């Protein structure tokens, strides 16, 4: 491979990597997660963004859709209860994985404050990113 070809290859490789991982913003507040369901890829980062709605919320993984019971598995999809700021979760799960989560504060979950994360393969979607590429 010539030097020029090597640089061209590196350039393309960098571009592909940069295009692969996306930031996906999920708004936390007003008794809901918005969007409630997201399609993401391994390597994407979920940016949970508290809306400072005057109420406290958290993000706790559950074991089924709409469940208000914390997962019995060891999980890193879990935050402190807070009222503002952001929390990032980088998707390390493989494609064809579903994850569910809810807010454990008061009766927020019972009021509909829960969400679903669909981990899909690269081919399934272009991206649901609302932020820029990393
Ligand atoms: Cu809440």
Image: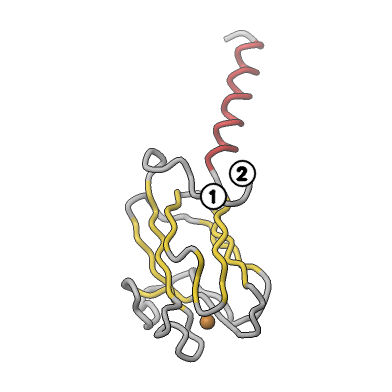
Position in image of residue 109 (x %, y %): 43, 82
Residue lying at 58% horizontally and 80% vertically, measured from the top left: 80
Residue lying at 46% horizontally and 55% vertically, measured from the top left: 92
Query: Who is closer to the viewer here, 93 or 23?
Result: 23
Label of residue 83 in the image: none
Query: Who is closer to the viewer here, 122 or 129?
Result: 129
State yes or no: discs 1 and 2 in contact (Cβ < 8 Å).
Answer: yes
Query: Who is closer to the viewer here, 29 or 86?
Result: 29
Task: Mark 1: give few (<14), some (14-19) or many (20+) Cα within 10 Å.
Answer: some
- Find the distance from the CA under tag 1 to the CA under tag 2: 8 Å
Q: Is mark 1 within 8 Å of ligand 1?
A: no
- Establish if 95 lies above or below 86: above
Q: Quadrant of the N terminus?
A: top right
Colour treatment of the image: secondary structure
The residue under label 2 is 133
Residue lying at 47% horizontally and 76% vertically, measured from the top left: 60
The residue under label 1 is 129
- Establish if 111 lies above or below 99: below
Q: Quadrant of residue 89?
A: bottom right
Position in image of residue 53 (x %, y %): 64, 79
- Establish if 4 lies above or below 99: above
């Amino acid at each position: 491979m010539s030097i020029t070809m090597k640089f061209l290859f590196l350039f393309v490789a960098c571009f592909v990597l940069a295009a692969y991982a996306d930031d996906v913003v999920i708004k936390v507040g007003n008794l809901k997660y918005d969007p409630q369901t997201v399609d993401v890829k391994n390597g994407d980062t979920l940016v949970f963004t508290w809306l400072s709605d005057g109420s406290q919320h958290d993000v706790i993984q559950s074991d089924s859709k709409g469940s208000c019971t914390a997962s019995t598995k060891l999980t890193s999809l879990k935050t402190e209860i807070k009222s503002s700021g952001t929390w990032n979760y980088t998707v390390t799960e493989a494609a064809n994985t579903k994850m569910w989560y809810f807010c454990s504060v008061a009766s927020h979950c019972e009021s509909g404050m829960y969400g679903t994360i669909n981990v899909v393969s690269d081919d399934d979607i272009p991206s649901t990113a609302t932020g820029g590429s990393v």
